[in-house]
Image (cartoon, grey):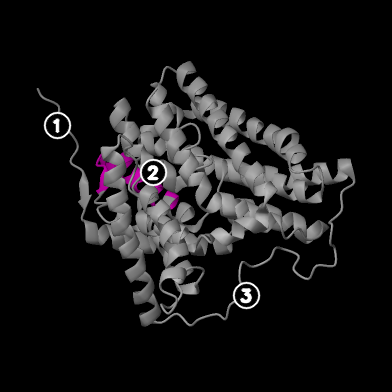
């Protein structure tokens, strides 16, 4: 007799998006009530999404019916987020970072390659296709949840392996935890060993310095419509750029050219149209970007089919041990000396511990913890976000494309 395949429980696009909002709110409540989630900087959609994924796994275990969400709207939210990052980037801020920014950018390029080489070695050792190197490397770790989910379908298509997205999310989530754990101890070790002190302990702001001291606008339906208009215009231009690059032989996910075009539009708009209300570094753009990323991650995480991860425990243990050791060695023995072996360099090392394994918020949280205890380092809060906000995504995209072509 022919075996009957289990019938999936199909959730349409509208209900899936609605469930994503609920998942995010559940995650926010869990994070607010759990000291562990707060201390380890686990994002709200990750907390809520993993709970939702556990529920769908229970449904599969009890009734043998997978839950499948229609994620038609998910990619839109991803592109909105990355477009917002581009629009928010101010090129004139590069001068404030100067030499440290160039050094960090160069080291980041090398680190991304090393991270993927570890991923390649792990994939080879466990008999996986070489394309899996980016899932075990920079797509999941220095790229984070958004990047690994964005590239996951392409890796799955290239390898034919099930559970690619699930494995990537597992690596990214474990990376966030590791990133939050190692940053503070790295800085503490460096500060104690080299007897370091802040260059300007009398600085008023013990965390960092703002890009601009502009009056805070009130978020209204008009400001939201204004920001959405420019985000959509930028996305259209990004799609055109993406098609042009594709014709030239460079096939990138849509969010990459939209990010690049966002940088261009965000910096040209005040020059070409000075009377247009500001877009860059406004509360409305920040709110829209946070909303888009949160919804995207919630939709992605709640749709995970965790049962496909069976048998990958050893792979996760090996790759995360190797990647964490790489992050610690890089921060202490490479980045710290390159940045000048001073207090600023120690704070940057803590941030690098968060950035290389986690995400920008984790890096900022690590540096904040250090500066609150030992004293301010304003330059660190300018240099690291400038690299992590958009340079890393561009560098990482080219690196991922290279390793997928091997």
Residue 315, position as x, y percentages in the image: 50, 26
Q: Would you say the residues marked 2 and 3 are in contact, meaning their CB atoms lie under 8 Å apart?
A: no
Look at 88% across and 42% down and name the residue there: 194
* Tag nearer the camera, 1 or 2: 2
Q: Main secondary structure of the magenta part?
A: helix
Estimate the spatial distance between the alpha carbons at disc 1 and disc 2, rounded to whole Å.
Answer: 31 Å
Span highlighted in magenta in the image: 50-68
Q: Residue furthest front?
A: 272
Above or below, 16 against 177 in this view is below
Look at 60% across and 43% down and name the residue there: 105
Label 3 sits on a secondary structure element that is loop
Residue that carries the numbered disc 1 in the rendered image: 4
- N-term mark: 1 or 2: 1
Residue that carries the numbered disc 3 in the rendered image: 213
Q: Residue furthest left?
A: 1
Residue 354, position as x, y percentages in the image: 63, 46
Where the C terminus falls, by quadrant? top left
Q: Is residue 193 left or right of residue 232?
A: right
Look at 32% across and 26% down and name the residue there: 159
Residue 176, position as x, y percentages in the image: 56, 45
- N-term mark: 1 or 3: 1
């Amino acid at each position: 007799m022919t075996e009957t395949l289990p019938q999936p429980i199909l959730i349409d696009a509208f209900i899936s998006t609605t469930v994503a909002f609920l998942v995010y709110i559940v995650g926010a409540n869990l994070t607010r009530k759990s000291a562990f989630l707060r201390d380890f900087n686990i994002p709200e959609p990750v907390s809520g999404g993993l709970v939702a994924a556990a529920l769908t796994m229970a449904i599969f275990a009890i009734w043998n019916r997978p839950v499948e969400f229609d994620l038609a709207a998910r990619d839109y939210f991803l592109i909105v987020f990355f477009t917002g990052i581009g629009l928010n980037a101010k090129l004139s801020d590069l001068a404030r970072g100067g030499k440290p920014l160039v050094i960090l950018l160069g080291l980041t390029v090398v680190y991304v390659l090393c991270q993927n080489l570890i991923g390649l070695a792990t994939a080879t050792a466990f008999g996986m296709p070489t394309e899996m190197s980016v899932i075990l490397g920079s797509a999941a770790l220095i790229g984070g949840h958004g990047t690994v989910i964005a590239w996951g379908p392409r890796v799955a298509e290239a390898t034919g392996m099930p559970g690619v997205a699930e494995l990537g999310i597992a690596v990214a989530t474990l990376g966030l935890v590791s990133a939050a754990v190692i940053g503070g101890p790295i800085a503490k070790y460096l500060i104690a060993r080299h007897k370091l002190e802040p260059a300007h302990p009398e600085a008023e702001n013990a965390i960092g310095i703002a890009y601009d001291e502009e009056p805070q606008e009130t978020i209204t339906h008009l400001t939201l419509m204004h920001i959405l208009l420019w985000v959509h215009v930028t996305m259209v231009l990004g799609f055109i750029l993406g098609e042009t690059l594709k014709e030239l032989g460079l096939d990138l996910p849509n969010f990459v050219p939209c990010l690049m075009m966002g940088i261009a539009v965000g910096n040209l708009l005040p020059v070409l149209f000075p009377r247009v209300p500001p877009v860059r570094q406004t509360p409305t753009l920040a709110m829209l970007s946070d909303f888009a990323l949160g919804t995207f991650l919630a939709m992605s995480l709640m749709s995970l089919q965790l049962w496909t991860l069976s048998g990958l425990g050893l792979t996760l243990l090996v790759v995360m041990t190797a990647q964490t050791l790489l992050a610690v060695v890089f921060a202490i023995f490479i980045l710290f000396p390159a940045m000048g072996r001073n207090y600023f360099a120690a704070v940057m090392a803590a941030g690098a511990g968060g950035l290389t394994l986690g995400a920008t918020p984790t890096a900022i949280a690590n540096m904040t913890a250090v500066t609150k205890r030992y004293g301010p380092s304003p330059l660190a809060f300018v240099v690291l976000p400038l690299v992590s906000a958009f340079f890393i995504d561009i560098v990482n995209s080219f690196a991922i494309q290279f390793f997928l072509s091997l």
